[in-house]
Image (cartoon, rainbow, N blue to C red):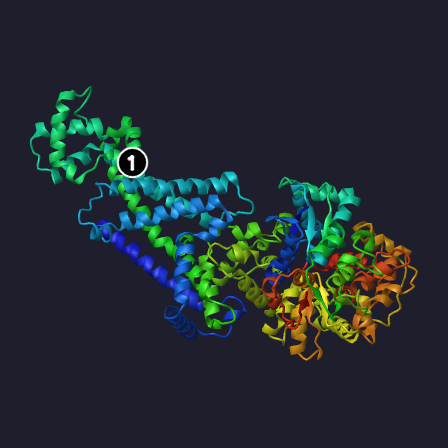
């Protein structure tokens, strides 16, 4: 009774959670892709899209992706054999246990008329699949905690997945071991399944079970007379063998039973079979009920992601479906860390410690963000940096085992952050190239805002630039600035050789681009060199020239004095960013 | 000869035809390639915000190649520039080297500096040599004029890059002339393509590109030849965008050097990924 009630409760919670999760795929808005669609538009687009795929040649692509990427998990195999082996063990073992063992009364029994959980092949297979999952789990723990795969971060969700699976498996194995040794269990079986009622005969049968099948009986002590065994076997064949294979086929349960031998009688008296039965089932029910909210939800979301990405295409798919897919992909992520391992810029994490640089952690952030959590200022700063510090090299997208289209996700999320008025000094670097390349896809009205915000933030700290008519005082020299500049690098100190011949500004293609360069750029390269020499920080940092430098090194190459003009401009950019943004990130509109 | 191939970030994601054609050409010339999965970004985009991090990025790649005992070949001029720049600083500045090596040590890596970084064009010109190249060329172009675009970050600062003469470089032109094409003189040959400013100041970036394209066209070029993914994207995808935005009305198609060379080795257009270029190259034909 309790069992049925709990089963239905957990099933109910599971279904409720499942529908909630699936509904978020249509409700949540991730990045700019989802801006213009209502939930009903997204649902109808999804239905149309799915029907369109099922009744076209694309169904073949779907079948292929299902076999190669969902069942055989080719994408994991390509990256890492150990991980593939680990996951295949857990995946195959778990699914088979689920179908054959957990749902035996629905599935196995309807396929096999002769099904008993105690006969082969079911007895053996249950143990075999159990060993598979357990081995997989051991490898998982080994990878995370002993091998320490680089940049593989362990979140509470990852631990929970390992723990719940571990509890289910270990309680199941112990339960089987205890059942084998249990005298109470033996008595129940004899009573319920055999026609024996003669105590003498039962004792004879018991002897075989003690000798060969791991039973621990309080009645039998010392050596068993070999003569009586043949009689026992006869009884066994008549009454048990039809629906009970040898317990030795329980390739893991039986050794556990032998191991428990010294304490088996005590355990039996304490009713341990019952206790472990409850632990096993409760763990399964908790696992089931919590599944939609845990990492294990990837069992459902990841195949959906793989299949959706196999048939979807940014240019051809309905944009509403892209929005839905991106919300779904957040659930598909298993936090496996493959993306972070391959990430082109992950080294920056090693140096700065900003977790948001790692793609796998950015996704964790997106999950929390999508569920409506508000960000603190420093969290926002970290995520802006993390999301912009990306070369769009696509490596994460290429390796993601569940096929998440991270390329599009990053692009949409980055743009969303930018359009909400957030920015980062990194917009003033070649990291912006990809955005420029894709500008036709973006809203042109506020396209330049993110760049202006940062340029203005830097310029606003430079008072002198705002008052061009003010008389500049050359004393006292800004020693702090000079010291900072001089200690920045050896290249920068070459500014002192500058005699203002203006060669640098003459050869500069950027200066040459404007009819009135000073109006467009502020100070020109030779003037910036002199400003550094005079310790005029505002003039050195405040010119637009700095951020419009093409870094072509014409100036440096042509300087007759060996002033490393381009290198100095680079250093000034570094310093200006540090000065302006280290303590405050005043970029909110 | 064997090299560790440094692809960088742009090529695998956006200019795959450069990788394909370069691999084909290098293969024909008997150059073996080692792919290093662990390579990361060269650090070029980080230099604007943090010099040390950008050096760390480069140094990690250098240390990885060094561990394999291989010289490094790059296809990208900006990667080349960053790696060479980092090499220079790591050799000159012992404090910086120690600091960077300390971070690298966590991964059991160390930069010692006993190997070379070369750009694709230098490998063709210096390591393989004009004579070997001539032997492998089976067809030649007739009557086509090419404007070579050298790319800033390989040329300058010349004392560090050691790529070619910074004022009158010849490598690229000689390589192009091997194919039978004529390498033209044009005023803006050594100027910037505009790519470093795309996304920061698009008008300026596209103006620099426009100036170059117009000058190349006016100097009689039929095609503009590149050997860098940034420059190529700028002259290819961005040029297409500029035409769509009516920023420019003439059209000077861009081709990657290994594509040009591959054609003269008898490799077909499809294999060289010529149709992956955005600008129209249909009429380009070599003859026996």
Residue B122 visible to the viewer: no
**Quarter of the view holding residue A579:** bottom right
The x, y position of residue A261, in whole percent, is 27, 27
Q: Nearer the viewer, residue A198 or B58?
A: B58
Q: Residue at x 52, y 71 (%)?
A: A315
| Parent chain of label 1 | A
Residue at far left of view = A198
Q: Residues within 10 Å of mark 1 (few under 14, many from 20)?
A: many
In the depicted structure, whether residue A6 falls above or below residue A20: above
Q: Residue at x 76, y 58 (%)?
A: B153
**Quarter of the view holding residue A212:** top left
Q: How many marks?
A: 1
The x, y position of residue A416, in whole percent, is 57, 68
Q: Image check: B101 left or right of A287?
A: right
Assign a secondary structure to mark 1.
Answer: helix
The x, y position of residue A322, in whole percent, is 48, 68
Residue at far front of view = B288
The x, y position of residue A123, in whole percent, is 25, 41
In the depicted structure, whether residue B33 falls above or below residue A508: above
In the depicted structure, whether residue A84 falls above or below residue A204: below
Q: Image check: A161 left or right of A253?
A: right
Q: Nearer the viewer, residue B47 or A65?
A: A65
Q: Image check: B60 left or right of A38?
A: right
Residue B107 visible to the viewer: yes
Residue that carries the numbered disc 1 in the rendered image = A253
Q: Residue at x 81, y 49 (%)?
A: A487
**Quarter of the view holding residue B231:** bottom right
Quadrant (top left, top right, bottom left, bottom right) of the C terminus of chain A: bottom right
């Amino acid at each position: 009774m309790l069992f049925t009630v709990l089963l239905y409760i957990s099933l109910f919670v599971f279904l409720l959670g499942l529908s909630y999760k699936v509904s978020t795929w249509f409700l949540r808005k991730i990045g700019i892709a989802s801006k213009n669609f209502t939930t009903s538009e997204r649902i109808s687009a999804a239905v149309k899209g799915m029907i369109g795929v099922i009744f076209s040649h694309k169904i073949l692509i779907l079948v292929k992706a299902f076999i190669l990427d969902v069942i055989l998990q080719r994408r994991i195999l390509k990256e890492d054999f150990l991980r593939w082996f680990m996951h295949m063990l857990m995946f195959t073992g778990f699914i088979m246990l689920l179908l054959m063992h957990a749902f035996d009364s629905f599935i196995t029994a309807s396929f096999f008329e002769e099904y008993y959980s105690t006969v082969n092949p079911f007895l053996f297979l249950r143990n075999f699949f159990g060993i598979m999952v357990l081995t997989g789990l051991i490898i998982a723990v080994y990878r995370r905690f002993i091998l320490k795969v680089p940049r593989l971060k362990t979140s509470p969700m990852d631990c929970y997945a390992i723990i719940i699976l571990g509890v289910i498996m270990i309680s199941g194995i112990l339960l089987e071991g205890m059942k084998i040794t249990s005298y109470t269990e033996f008595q129940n079986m004899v009573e319920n399944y055999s026609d024996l009622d003669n105590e003498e005969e039962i004792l004879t049968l018991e002897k075989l079970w003690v000798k060969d099948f791991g039973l621990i009986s309080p009645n039998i002590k010392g050596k068993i007379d070999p003569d009586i065994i043949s009689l026992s076997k006869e009884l066994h064949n008549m009454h048990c063998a039809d629906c009970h294979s040898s317990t030795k086929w329980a390739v893991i349960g039986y050794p556990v039973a032998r191991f428990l031998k010294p304490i088996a009688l005590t355990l039996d008296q304490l009713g341990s079979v019952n206790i472990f039965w409850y632990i096993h089932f409760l763990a399964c029910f908790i696992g089931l009920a919590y599944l939609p909210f845990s990492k294990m939800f990837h069992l459902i979301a990841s195949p959906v992601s793989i299949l959706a990405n196999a048939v979807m295409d940014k240019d051809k798919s309905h944009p509403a479906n892209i929005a839905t897919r991106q919300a779904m992909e957040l659930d598909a992520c298993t936090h496996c860390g493959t993306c972070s391992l391959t990430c082109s810029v992950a080294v920056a994490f090693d140096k700065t410690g900003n977790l948001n640089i790692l793609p796998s952690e950015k996704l964790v952030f997106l999950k929390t963000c999508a569920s409506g959590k508000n960000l603190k200022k420093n969290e926002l700063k970290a995520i802006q940096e993390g999301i912009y510090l990306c070369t769009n090299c696509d490596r994460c997208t290429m390796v993601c085992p569940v096929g998440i289209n991270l390329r599009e996700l990053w692009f949409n999320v980055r743009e969303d952050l930018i359009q909400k008025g957030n920015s980062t000094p990194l917009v003033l670097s070649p990291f912006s190239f990809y955005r420029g390349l894709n500008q036709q896809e973006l809203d042109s009205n506020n396209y330049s805002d993110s760049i202006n915000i940062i340029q203005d933030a830097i310029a606003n700290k430079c008072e002198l630039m705002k008052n061009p008519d003010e008389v500049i005082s050359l004393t006292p020299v800004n020693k702090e600035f000079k010291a900072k500049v001089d200690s920045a690098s050896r290249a920068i100190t070459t500014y002192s050789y500058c005699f203002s011949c203006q060669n640098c500004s003459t050869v500069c293609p950027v200066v040459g681009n404007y009819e009135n360069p000073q109006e467009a750029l502020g100070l020109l390269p030779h003037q910036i060199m002199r400003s550094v020499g005079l310790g005029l920080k505002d003039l050195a940092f405040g010119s637009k020239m700095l951020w419009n430098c093409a870094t072509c090194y014409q100036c440096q190459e042509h300087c007759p004095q060996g002033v490393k003009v381009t290198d100095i401009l680079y250093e000034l950019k570094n310093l200006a960013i540090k000065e302006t943004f280290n303590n405050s990130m005043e970029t909110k509109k | 000869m064997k090299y560790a191939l440094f692809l960088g970030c742009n090529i695998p994601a956006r200019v795959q035809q450069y990788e394909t054609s370069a691999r084909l050409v290098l293969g024909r010339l008997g150059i073996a390639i080692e792919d290093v999965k662990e390579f990361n970004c060269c650090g070029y985009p980080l230099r604007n915000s943090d010099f040390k991090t950008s050096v760390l990025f480069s140094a990690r790649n250098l240390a990885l190649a060094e561990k394999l005992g291989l010289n490094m070949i790059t296809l990208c001029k900006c990667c080349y520039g960053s790696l060479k720049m980092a090499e220079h600083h790591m050799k000159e500045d012992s404090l910086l080297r120690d600091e960077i090596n300390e971070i690298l040590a966590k991964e059991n890596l160390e930069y010692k500096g006993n190997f070379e970084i070369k750009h694709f064009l230098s490998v063709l010109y210096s390591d393989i040599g004009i004579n070997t190249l001539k032997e492998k060329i089976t067809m030649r172009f007739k009557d086509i004029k090419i404007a070579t675009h050298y790319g800033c970050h390989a040329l300058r600062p010349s004392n560090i890059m050691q790529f070619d003469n910074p004022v009158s470089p010849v490598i690229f032109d000689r390589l192009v002339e091997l194919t039978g094409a004529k390498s033209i003189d044009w005023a803006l040959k050594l100027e910037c393509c505009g790519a470093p400013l795309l996304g920061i100041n698009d008008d300026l970036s596209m103006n620099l590109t426009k100036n170059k394209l117009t000058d190349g066209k006016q100097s009689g070029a039929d095609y503009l030849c590149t050997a860098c993914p940034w420059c190529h994207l700028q002259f290819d995808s961005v040029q297409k965008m500029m035409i769509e935005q009516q920023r420019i009305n003439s059209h000077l198609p861009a081709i990657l050097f290994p594509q040009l060379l591959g054609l003269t080795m008898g490799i077909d257009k499809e294999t060289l990924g010529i149709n992956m270029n955005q600008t129209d190259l249909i009429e380009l034909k070599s003859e026996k």
